[in-house]
């Protein structure tokens, strides 16, 4: 299917000279992109590249079935262009973002408002009017930005008729730290550490994507042993977060045995990452060109022993959970996202797989160690909280098995290397399947090989809309379990 | 049957809450490194090797002066430790890092090789909070790691509740704030409002390099370089993120619930 694409094709974790990427006029570019999306491509990234006072649009698409990515761009322009969102809602937030960052107006966009820009007082996100449902029976519920637990800030605005939610609008931007702006002219000395904290619970996925982009720009790749180490750390990250979320879901339906067990086991998984690199979140492990630490045989033996114990524990804790009818009935048919909706809004990760969509970067666009060792994709139909919890628990099993298999067959050799300088005027793309889904980093270098534009798409950017849709027709009291079943990142979205 | 299973499991596992602070503190991971120590006297003349490798510009060396390291800015990447030729910067492996005053995190001057650990609150506040401290947590640009390692203190292994410390769902129920993140412009109003909603007397705890000084985002126009820009801070807990043990040590220390050696528990105030 992709062979006939007018876009420039490239594989995940590779680069392309900027001049080789095909150019269209803005209107034509939107039309061509829409054509590709209609025949099955997925929008990974849509962003602007400043060119003097004008801006070019760039699209990165994924043809999952063909294991290939595609890039296209528009001529530089100022002003308006026909909105892609009208035919392809997955572009909705991307177009708002481009409008906010570069002033390009998507004509006909149904809901054009700021994404994360600060207000004129520089003390809160600019936001705008919320969508309101009219009617004497309608009431509005506002939640946040500061939430009731130990959690990041964001604002939720519910339109309710009694208990039922008719519409939920999610307003973010509170966490905006200027990550992308700071990357221009980089990499700087703080860059690697900013990549570690784009979303602090997804450190390994984001640092792996960043390192991969730099390696692709340098025309090389990390030593095999480093790729193996990154794959291990990525699964440990997945295990820790999925375990934490299973515990949180159990806690929200007052099923305390699993809730308290998972709280502890999550820490056991985090401590396995700390065994490799000293930090529970994998800070400092992934460096461009390799990894900072090796996993020596003695340390590997300890890791395997502790992993086996934690696996037994989590298997048991999750088994109680699925065994309890009181838990299952609380999750079934709650917070449903239909498969067609999921495809239309471009859901990724476990949230997409819980709608029956087979999409997983490790399988569709294997790079690094995943070219040699693939994990099976965990899919469950239904699109409800039950399905999302089920996919998480399947992934807990499979990540554990994958880890044990890979730990039994380590890659030999060096785990770090000196990275050559990045190529000039080159675009590189790296996708990594983080625990929430597809982490996408796109870097474009200037004539000196420095970053001219760096685009980060956290899986949460695709998936917040999924949470909003899941709430439609759901009781507002079920918001906590719907929210936990997605558990999206605020800072990864706000950048 | 999950009921029988879970009871059997609990009986088999016994109490999973750690003995600390009655017993010894759990060991930090061997590659963690703990707090840093600076022997500026060891610095060779004219050496600036550590200055440019620090990602948060936590290290400075003025002409003719010994080097200075701000542990509040430090994200513990250990780049300086690795590069220092005379080994003037070393890792102590010590989890204890919490201080009451910002300047107590500045290392390098003679007699200030290490952090000056936090003293307990004065007697009046200890009487109020020593046995019951309710905190409201505000993440203001935090990346979810400091939040996660604060959250973990509520799990069965740490059981923060046994010290009378609890995170609450409203500032009106709280005795103070625990702040994470560099404080983005976009959260500054919400943070100020939350602080104002807590009844006095109140305490503020800044957890992590971001909340102390901006962390990896220090200097960005979109952040205010830490909580002190908006509210007065009473306790600083360094780290990126701090290990849960470091956070717990800080909380117990400020409540006067640790003996001076930090290894065993003090009795709560009468």
Image (spheres, coloured by chain):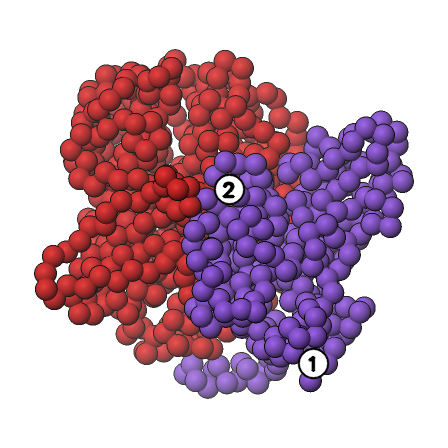
Q: Position of residue A25 (x, y in %)?
A: 23, 16
The answer for how far apart the CA atoms under marks 1 and 2 are is: 39 Å
Left or right, B188 with respect to A473, comes to right
Disc 1 and disc 2 on one polypeptide chain? yes
Q: Nearer the viewer, residue A475 or A390?
A: A475
Q: Report which residue position mark 1 lands on.
A: B269
Q: Nearer the viewer, residue A55 or A225?
A: A55
Q: Residue furthest left?
A: A135
Mark 1: few/some/many CA within 10 Å (<14, 14-19, 20+): some
* Pointer 1 or 2: first along the chain: 2
Q: Quadrant of the N terminus of chain A?
A: top left
Q: Which of the chains bears the disc numbered 2? A: B
Q: Colour of chain B?
A: purple
Q: Position of residue B105 (x, y in %)?
A: 73, 50
Disc number for residue B223: 2
Tag 2's secondary structure? Answer: loop
- The mark tally for this picture is 2
Q: Nearer the viewer, residue B251 or A199?
A: B251
The residue positioned 74% from the left and 77% from the top of the image is: B266
The residue positioned 83% from the left and 44% from the top of the image is: B109
Disc number for residue B105: none
The residue positioned 68% from the left and 69% from the top of the image is: B121
> Compared to A150, does B57 lie above or below?
above
Residue A143 visible in image: yes
Tag 1's secondary structure? Answer: loop
Q: Position of residue A23 (x, y in %)?
A: 29, 16
Q: Quadrant of the C terminus of chain A?
A: top left
Q: Which chain is red?
A: A
């Amino acid at each position: 299917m992709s062979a006939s694409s007018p876009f420039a094709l490239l594989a995940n974790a590779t680069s392309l000279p900027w001049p080789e990427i095909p150019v269209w006029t803005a209107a034509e570019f939107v039309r061509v992109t829409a054509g590709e999306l209609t025949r099955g491509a997925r929008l990974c990234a849509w962003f602007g590249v400043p060119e003097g006072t004008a801006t070019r649009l760039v699209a990165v698409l994924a043809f999952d079935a063909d294991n290939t990515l595609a890039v296209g761009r528009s001529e530089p322009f100022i002003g308006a262009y026909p909105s892609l969102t009208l035919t392809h809602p997955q572009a909705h937030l991307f177009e708002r973002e481009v409008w906010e960052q570069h002033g390009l107006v998507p004509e006909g966009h149904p809901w054009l408002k700021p994404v994360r820009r600060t207000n004129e007082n520089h003390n809160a996100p600019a936001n705008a009017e919320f969508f309101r449902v009219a009617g004497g029976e309608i009431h509005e519920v506002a939640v946040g930005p500061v939430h009731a637990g130990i959690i990041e800030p964001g604002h939720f605005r519910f339109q309710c008729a009694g208990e039922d939610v008719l519409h939920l609008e999610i307003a973010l931007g509170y966490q905006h730290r200027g990550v992308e702006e700071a990357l221009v002219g980089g990499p700087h000395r703080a860059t690697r550490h900013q990549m570690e904290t784009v979303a602090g619970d997804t450190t390994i996925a984001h640092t792996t994507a960043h390192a991969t982009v730099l390696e692709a720009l340098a025309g090389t790749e990390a030593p095999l042993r480093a790729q193996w180490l990154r794959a291990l750390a990525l699964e440990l990250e997945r295990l820790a977060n999925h375990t934490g979320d299973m515990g949180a879901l159990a806690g929200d339906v007052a099923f305390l045995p699993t809730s308290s067990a998972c709280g502890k086991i999550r820490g056991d998984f985090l401590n396995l990452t700390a065994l490799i690199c000293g930090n529970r979140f994998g800070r400092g492990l992934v460096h461009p060109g390799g990894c900072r630490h090796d996993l020596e045989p003695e340390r590997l033996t300890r890791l395997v022993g502790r992993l086996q114990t934690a696996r037994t524990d989590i298997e048991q804790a999750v088994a109680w959970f699925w065994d309890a009818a009181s838990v299952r009935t609380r999750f079934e048919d709650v917070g449903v996202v239909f498969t067609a909706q999921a495809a239309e809004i471009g859901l990724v990760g476990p949230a997409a797989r819980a709608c029956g969509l087979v999409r997983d970067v490790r399988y569709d666009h294997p790079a690094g160690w995943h070219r040699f060792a693939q994990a099976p994709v965990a899919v469950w139909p239904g699109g409800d909280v039950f399905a999302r919890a089920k996919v998480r628990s399947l992934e807990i099993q499979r990540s554990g098995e994958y880890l044990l298999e890979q730990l039994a067959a380590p890659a030999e050799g060096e785990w770090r290397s000196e990275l050559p300088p990045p190529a000039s005027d080159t675009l590189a793309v790296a996708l990594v399947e983080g625990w929430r889904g597809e982490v996408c980093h796109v870097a474009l270098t200037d004539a000196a090989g420095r970053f001219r534009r760096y685009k980060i798409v956290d899986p949460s950017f695709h998936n917040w809309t999924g949470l909003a849709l899941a709430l439609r027709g759901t009781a507002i009291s079920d918001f906590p379990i719907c929210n936990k079943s997605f558990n999206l990142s605020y800072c990864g979205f706000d950048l | 049957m999950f009921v029988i299973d879970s009871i059997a499991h609990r009986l088999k596992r016994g109490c999973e809450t750690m003995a600390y602070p009655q017993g010894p503190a759990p060991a930090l991971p061997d590659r963690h490194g703990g707090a840093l120590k600076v022997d500026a006297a060891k610095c060779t003349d004219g050496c600036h090797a550590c200055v440019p490798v620090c990602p948060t510009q936590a290290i400075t060396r003025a002409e003719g002066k010994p080097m200075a390291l701000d542990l509040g800015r430090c994200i513990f990447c250990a780049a300086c430790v690795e590069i220092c030729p005379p080994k003037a910067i070393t890792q102590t492996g010590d989890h204890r890092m919490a201080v009451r005053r910002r300047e107590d995190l500045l290392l390098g001057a003679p007699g200030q090789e290490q952090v000056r650990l936090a003293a307990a609150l004065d007697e009046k506040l200890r009487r109020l909070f020593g046995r019951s401290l309710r905190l409201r947590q505000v993440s203001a640009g935090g990346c979810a790691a400091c939040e996660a390692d604060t959250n973990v203190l509520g799990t069965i292994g740490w059981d923060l509740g046994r010290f009378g410390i609890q995170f609450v769902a409203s500032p009106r129920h709280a005795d103070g704030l625990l702040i994470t993140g560099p404080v983005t412009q976009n959260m500054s109003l919400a943070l100020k409002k939350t602080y104002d909603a807590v009844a006095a007397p109140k305490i503020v705890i800044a957890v992590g390099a971001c909340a102390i000084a901006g962390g990896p985002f220090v200097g960005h126009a979109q952040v205010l370089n830490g909580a002190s820009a908006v509210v007065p801070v009473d306790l600083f807990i360094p780290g990126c993120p701090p290990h849960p043990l470091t956070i717990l040590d800080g909380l117990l220390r400020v409540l006067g619930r640790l003996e001076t050696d930090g290894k065993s528990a003090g009795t709560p105030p009468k």
